Image: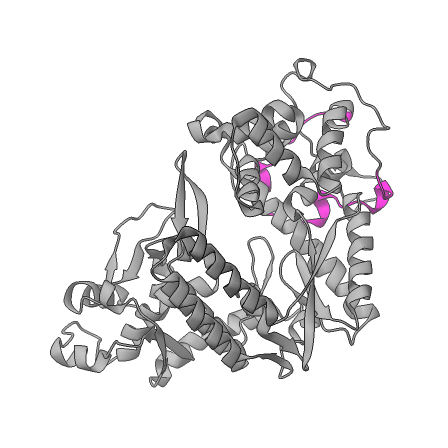
Amino acid sequence: MRLYIPENLDIDQIVYDYPPNFKKYKHKRDKLLYVIHLINALTLYNKDLMYDDFVSISAKILQDKISNYKEYLNYLINVAKIIETDNQYFVGSKSKGFRLTEEYRCEVAIHSISDQTFHRKLKVERNNRAVSVKHLNYLTKWFDEKLEIDIDSVNKFLAEEYVLKKDNKSLWQSKKFNNYGKVEVKYKRPIDQLNHAKISVEKLSRKDYYLLHDDNVYRFHSNLTNMRSVIRNAVTYDGQKLISIDIKNSQPYLSTILLSRSFWIEQKNEPNTQKELSIRFDDPENLPFSSFNSNNYKVDSKIDDRLSISHIKVHDTDSYIMLGDIDKTLMNNEFSQYINLVVSGTLYEFLEQQFSLRLGETFSNRKEVKTAVFQVLFTDNRFLGQEDAKPKKMFKEMFPYVYEVFRQIKSKDKSLLPRLLQSIESYLMINVIAKRISIEYPDAPIFTIHDSISTTAEYVDIVEAIMTEELTKAIGHAPKLAREEWCKSNMVKHLETLKEKAKVVA
């Protein structure tokens, strides 16, 4: 077990200058370093944490490893002045946040744990992860000695990128967040991105694999899933380049199954027994496009092959609305327009045009359009009344039935829709597609990264064909898939793009 701490931090000198006087310390310097390490390491499992000034660390994570963790925190914050806290804690929604003080916001160095008792305690977590993926041998077996990364190329790339970014905020990666009804733009600090990449590359290089099947939306997490996409270009398997096959517009594409009445019919184990879960519109007669025209879109698979709610593991199933018949209100012109845009791969382009025409909003790149669409799909229903919710209001006007389906799913819990879509994605990519590939082509190396699968050139056509077939059967419409070769030349192109953007800003 290795810890990642600021390279300019001399913990022995600090402990000598400011001796900890709380009970149970007894020279447990590894525990002090572990708390500091978490601030850097937690971003490995959730890249979005880098957008926050303070990294939220749950009391449970600390309590499981350090029984008197509060005394360690107090020492690091008030005595050693190594970390600071936002002191913001909300029951059930936010843990206290922590960050390094300015002096220690620098590149990380590796520290090996010497306390064997503490090392054994940390191994418990690793053992729990191993249990979670025991049934996924067809995915985990490829994380072996043949999976490699060109660490020298990556370190050279990171050094150049950091020099370009550190004093030029226009090059910093940004993202819009809905913060209590107000849209806020947040940035990833270049030093945080640098450290995140250094740690993830170092771990993969040492074959220190992090493999986890989570119990929230059942995604398979690995060293590759949370690695920066540009860094993956330096990864190879058995000396061969890898090619990823992605589902384009995956969240809108998967959302189309929620507009199918068959999805909400839960198949029971008993023969001829079904339980219907559906969505009631308060007054369908008041909504447009209420007449059903079966010619508007084509369902590409048999109803019996379609995915249903009974296939999906979901938490908080009581949040689903159990309703009455919807037959014709669920299959109508307006659904067809939305589905056609999604299936043709033109939804983002269409909405970008509409945002411009109706709202006067323009976007500098596709990522900004995607962010606006995610606002429409995933923000709280109550956000509709906010000034920044114009795209959401426009979507509701254009696709009232689709909006109503999504609204009802989120009516008790705004996180239910994204979690449901991620659970659908996990089931299809892991339980259906990857498993079938492993059975029919056991020698095909496969690496799932949520809505994509990467493999070698020898098997890429086979993997793409199976993805297309299984997704078409499950969702009812063929997906749009895109290939991307992992190649170090993409890292060079990334740097060239940054240099050009820097010139424009200058």
Q: Quadrant of residue 133?
A: bottom right
**Does the rendering let one see residue 212?**
no
Relative to 279, residue 136 above or below: below
Task: Give the residue drawn at x 57%, y 44%.
Answer: 418
Q: Is residue 280 magenta?
A: no
Numbered disc total: 0
Residue 154 in picture, x, y percent from top left: 50, 75
Task: Give the residue drawn at x 25%, y 76%.
Answer: 9
Relative to 144, residue 448 above or below: above
Q: Is residue 207 left or right of residue 430?
A: left
**Main SS class of the magenta portion in the image:** loop
Q: Is residue 109 left or right of residue 281?
A: left
Residue 457 in picture, x, y percent from top left: 76, 71
Residue 325 in picture, x, y percent from top left: 74, 25
Where's the N terminus, which quadrant?
bottom left
Q: Quadrant of residue 393?
A: top right
Outermost top residue: 286
Q: Quadrant of residue 139?
A: bottom right
**Does the rendering let one see residue 283?**
yes
Q: How are the colours assigned in the image?
A: one colour
Q: Is residue 309 magenta?
A: yes
Near-viewer residue (329 or 387): 387
In the rendered structure, which segment of residues is drawn in magenta?
299-327
Q: Is residue 95 left or right of residue 217?
A: left
Residue 436 in picture, x, y percent from top left: 79, 64
Relative to 91, residue 146 above or below: below
